[in-house]
């Protein structure tokens, strides 16, 4: 499978600009997820790739071949979406074997081929089962197996797990990636679920309002997002506004409602307005038993045990609310109403220039 | 806070034809409590909520609200606000009017109703769409309008069926904490149905886990997580590693479980008989990865198969040969210090302390079925 190139694709629906000159390259055998809030254009982009929606302008290339004007059936791709569409009168086996049958394949070889796919998708035990007797997860796996049986090189996945229970979704996503990798396919997966996207993708494409905000590996975008929007969309973050008091020799001092914060960084000038993004796991709370008058202390507003994590909401004495979420160590948490001080993990503070359009608009999820 | 239970179900069953949707459920929910009813699709969650709302009546058993029997009382006489999953907004009314309808229907003046509507719209972050009509909004926004309308009626009891189900994942995380805060600030009792265990863990005072119409466990999130009563619960709430085995040795406070030929896992406690068929289970985040060997117990070498980013954690799949594959969730910063993403394919060591290993009797059904691994 050659690389895929999307060049300046534009699509307008009546008065809504769904895709605003989007360009993107996807490499052979890559698993790429496109994520963004609803209405960001991610599904429209996928449909343009599939040929289901015709873009107003721009080109799409698969390798050297331009497919811009080709109908969907000539693009050699598999398409799977949220609504599970199986033939209700056919068993799981017959559903999966539908593609090969239509292609005129029959006999032992075709049977073996379908059998292989059933095994890969771990659907063997459900072979004779009809769709209405299958669980949601098994149905969606059957739909996936059927798409694979058509032997596409490129899989387009539009919220493929969206209709499933959270628990099943969390299990199936890893199977989805495993299959795509085992078969050596290229996959483009559209989802609104950032954890799903981060956990199974080689690269992520973040979209907002018809444009690509940022592209990178999950670790790049999670640890050092270039844009504030990404910091907010991909995992939680605290956003702390302040003013640069000093910036030299790789150290920045920021004043936040009268309190000071030092961290490593550069590229800011004295007096500049700044926003600091701090992931909840980079906020490390400790009991403030000395009752010191030091800065970055406050009282615990709420505290939740999330199982694998502990989440603590702290109201700082300068009026800032801050959320900490750290791996559950089994230690006694600080109780609601008690005083706590917080420290920030090294490299845990990501500084941004204050956005020209204002912080709320920059972070807006809809 | 009064000690009077706000909701009491006594041995409630509900059958539809031959299907037993709810099976001998008894449950007490305290005034001001936030309870999540959690379960897979088809476990009876919505039926349970509709029974409390009075939208369907039990086949047997009784229901009390605020100490008064209401088993067959009409929904409108129950002083409860029910927000269904399939919310129905009035298409010809603006968002603001839709929300104000809640209090208006409960006898508030139009002025008060609109004021409350504005407050609630602010809470669900939709003030800027007050003048829009429902069809102009996304599904997630419509769901929040329905939620605001339910809240605006100021009922002391809120019954919410997947109130965040149609909302994008990122916003859902923000809203769930706000929903909890809101309920606590208003002092209302909430029963919130969800299939999302993270949502339940992060919002509820107590969680009732339903399975096939019966309550599997009803407890505080930390207790369900820390001391699940079945492999199903351990798997459904939080996920875990499971190894089938046999008890081969018991000492004062230690049990040794053989999980593969020549390999045993040590667990604290000794509740299971020698020779007993059991399942040893340990949480993924209490499974640590070491890059060099040590002499600690429950330490096994394995091949790092893959790593994937979850956010706070890096999820690592490790192949332990004849023991099978297990998953370790390592705090991200720790994982990066160990350079785990670059070590895929390498031999590493996994370990779970004996105190982290829970032991269950082997379920009657095959483990895969028990875990609903479909």
Image (cartoon, coloured by chain):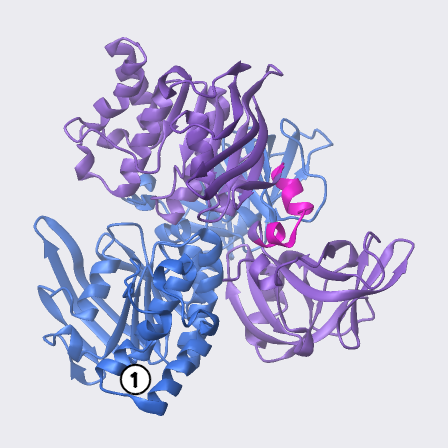
Q: Is residue A61 left or right of residue B311?
A: left
Residue B116 location, quadrant: top left
Q: Which residue: 14% across, 28% down?
A: B92
- Per the rendering, the colour in which chain B appears is purple
- Per the rendering, the colour in which chain A appears is blue
Q: Which residue: 30% across, 81% down?
A: A151
- How far across and down, in percent of the image, does residue B332 sit? 57, 60
**Residue B220 or residue A307, whichever sits in front:** B220
At label 1, counting other C-alpha atoms closer than 10 Å, the crowd grade (few under 14, some 14-19, many 20 or more) is some
User: Please, is residue B57 above or below residue B138 in the view?
Assistant: above
- How far across and down, in percent of the image, does residue B350 sit? 70, 68
Q: Is residue A178 visible?
A: yes
Magenta-colored stretch includes residue A63: no
**Residue B286 or residue A204, whichever sits in front:** B286
Q: Is residue B350 left or right of residue A126?
A: right
Residue A290 location, quadrant: top right
Q: Which residues are magenta?
A: B218-235
- How far across and down, in percent of the image, does residue B374 sit? 49, 62
- How far across and down, in percent of the image, does residue B81 sit? 39, 23
The quarter in which the N terminus of chain B is drawn is: top right
The residue to which callout 1 is attached is A1
Q: Chain of mark 1?
A: A
Residue lying farthest right? Answer: B252
User: Please, is residue B85 above or below residue B294 in the view?
Assistant: above
């Amino acid at each position: 499978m050659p690389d895929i190139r999307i060049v300046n694709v534009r699509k307008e629906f009546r008065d809504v600009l769904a895709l605003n000159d989007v360009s993107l390259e996807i490499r052979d055998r890559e698993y790429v997820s496109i994520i963004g809030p609803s209405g960001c254009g991610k599904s429209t982009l996928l449909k343009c790739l599939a040929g289901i929606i015709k873009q107003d302008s721009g080109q799409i290339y698969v390798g050297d071949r331009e497919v811009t004007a080709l109908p969907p059936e000539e693009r050699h791709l598999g398409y799977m979406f949220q609504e599970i569409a199986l033939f209700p009168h056919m068993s799981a086996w017959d559903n999966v074997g539908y593609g090969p049958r239509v292609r005129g394949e029959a006999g032992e070889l075709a049977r073996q081929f379908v059998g292989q796919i059933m095994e890969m998708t771990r659907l063997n035990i459900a072979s004779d089962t009809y769709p209405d007797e299958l669980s949601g997860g098994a149905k969606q796996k059957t739909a996936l197996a059927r798409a694979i049986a058509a032997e596409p090189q490129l899989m387009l996945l539009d919220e493929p797990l969206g209709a499933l229970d959270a628990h099943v979704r969390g299990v199936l996503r890893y199977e989805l990636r495993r299959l795509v990798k085992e078969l050596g396919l290229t996959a483009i997966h559209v989802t609104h679920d950032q954890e799903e996207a981060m956990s199974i993708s080689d690269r992520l494409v973040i979209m907002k309002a018809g444009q690509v905000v940022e592209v990178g590996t999950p670790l790049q975008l999670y640890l050092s997002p270039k844009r504030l929007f990404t910091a907010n969309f991909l995992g939680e973050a605290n956003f702390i506004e302040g003013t640069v008091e000093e910036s030299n020799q790789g150290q920045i001092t920021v004043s936040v409602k009268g309190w000071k914060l030092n961290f490593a960084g550069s590229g800011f000038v004295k007096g500049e307005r700044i926003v600091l993004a701090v992931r909840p796991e980079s906020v490390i709370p400790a009991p403030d038993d000395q009752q010191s008058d030091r800065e970055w202390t406050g009282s615990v507003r709420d505290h939740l045990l999330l199982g694998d994590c502990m989440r603590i909401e702290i109201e700082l004495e300068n009026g800032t609310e801050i959320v900490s979420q750290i791996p559950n160590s089994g230690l006694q948490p600080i109780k609601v109403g008690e005083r706590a001080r917080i420290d920030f993990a090294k490299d845990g503070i990501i500084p941004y220039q204050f956005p020209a359009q204002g912080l709320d608009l920059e972070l807006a999820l809809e | 806070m009064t000690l009077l239970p706000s909701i009491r179900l006594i041995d409630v069953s509900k059958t539809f034809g031959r299907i037993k949707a709810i099976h001998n459920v008894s449950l007490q929910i305290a005034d001001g409590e936030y309870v999540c009813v959690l379960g897979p699709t088809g476990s009876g969650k919505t039926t349970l909520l509709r029974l409390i709302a009075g939208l369907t009546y039990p086949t047997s058993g009784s229901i009390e609200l605020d100490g008064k029997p209401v088993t067959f009382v009409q929904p409108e006489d129950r002083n409860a606000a029910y927000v269904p999953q399939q919310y129905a907004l009035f298409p010809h009314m603006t968002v603001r009017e839709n929300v104000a309808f809640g209090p208006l229907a409960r006898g508030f003046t139009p002025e008060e109703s609109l004021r409350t509507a504005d407050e609630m719209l602010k809470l669900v972050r939709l003030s800027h769409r007050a003048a829009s009509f429902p069809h102009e909004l996304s599904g997630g926004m419509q769901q929040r309008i329905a939620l605001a309308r339910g809240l605006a009626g100021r009922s002391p009891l809120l019954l919410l069926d997947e109130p965040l189900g149609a909302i994008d994942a990122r916003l859902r995380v923000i809203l769930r904490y706000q929903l909890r805060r809101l309920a606590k600030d208003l002092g209302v009792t909430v029963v919130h149905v969800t299939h999302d265990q993270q949502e339940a863990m992060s919002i509820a005072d107590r969680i009732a886990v339903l399975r096939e119409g019966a309550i599997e466990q009803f407890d505080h999130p930390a207790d369900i997580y820390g001391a699940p009563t079945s492999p199903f619960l351990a798997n459904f709430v939080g996920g875990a590693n499971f190894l089938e085995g046999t008890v081969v040795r018991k000492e004062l406070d230690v049990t040794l479980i053989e999980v593969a030929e020549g390999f045993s896992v040590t667990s604290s406690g000794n509740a299971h008989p020698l020779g007993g068929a059991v399942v040893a289970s340990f949480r993924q985040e209490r499974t640590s990865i070491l890059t060099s060997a040590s002499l600690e117990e429950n330490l096994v070498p394995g091949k790092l198969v893959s790593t994937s980013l979850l956010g706070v954690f890096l999820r690592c799949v490790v192949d332990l040969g004849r023991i099978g594959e297990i998953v370790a969730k390592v705090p991200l910063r720790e994982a990066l210090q160990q350079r785990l993403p670059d070590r895929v394919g390498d031999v590493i060591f996994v370990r779970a302390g004996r105190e982290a290993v829970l032991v269950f009797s082997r379920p009657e059904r095959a483990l895969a079925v028990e875990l609903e691994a479909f």
